[in-house]
Amino acid sequence: MVSLPRAIEILQAREVLEGLTASRAADHITPKDATALRADLAVQRKHLDRGDLLAASDANAAFHRRVVTIARHETAARLISSLHAQMVRFQYRTILAPGRSESSFAEHLAIADAIADGNARAAERAMRRHIANVTAALQSLDASGHASVNGR
């Protein structure tokens, strides 16, 4: 099992790798891919509207997988997959933090917009900002998964 400090390190590595894949996705986006990204977001929105945060988290993961697929960067895909496998213990924690689900959805919209527009720089920035916010949310949780009093 991965410790909280190790999970933070993994997210920091994912920030760089997923920023790369967002940039590459913007370079490779097709109309069909853009439609698929929007469909992933629609599923996430539906789950959020129903208050099903665990299903929304699964839809979140599907969105990230879609970005990696569109990027067509095999090495980044393999590394990201390996890092995700180590984070199973923390998979649902951040989405349960108050307000995080809506923030995450808005961040996904920004990522999808930049990718669909073919703006590689904006896509990378949006993805890195998103993963940095996930990291900050995780850092605000204590080891039991509850928001800590002192923010650590």
Image: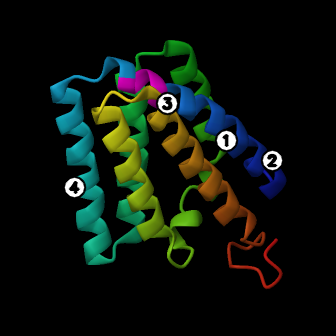
Calculate the distance from the C-alpha at mark 4 to the C-alpha at mark 1.
28 Å
Residue 66 found in image quarter: top left
Give neighbour class at mark 4: few <14, some 14-19, many 20+ (Cα, 10 Å). few
Residue 42's disc is 4
Q: Verify CB contact (< 8 Å) between mark 2 and mark 1.
A: yes
Residue 86's disc is 1
Calculate the distance from the C-alpha at mark 4 to the C-alpha at mark 2.
32 Å
Residue 91 found in image quarter: bottom right
Please state if 102 lies on the left or on the right of 138 as rendered: left
Residue denoted by label 2: 6
Q: Which is nearer the N-term, disc 2 or disc 1?
A: 2
Residue 49 found in image quarter: bottom left
Magenta stretch in the rendered image: 22-26
Q: Residue furthest bottom?
A: 149
Q: Which is nearer the N-term, disc 4 or disc 3?
A: 4
Residue denoted by label 3: 121
> Looking at the picture, how far across and down is residue 2, in whole percent?
76, 49
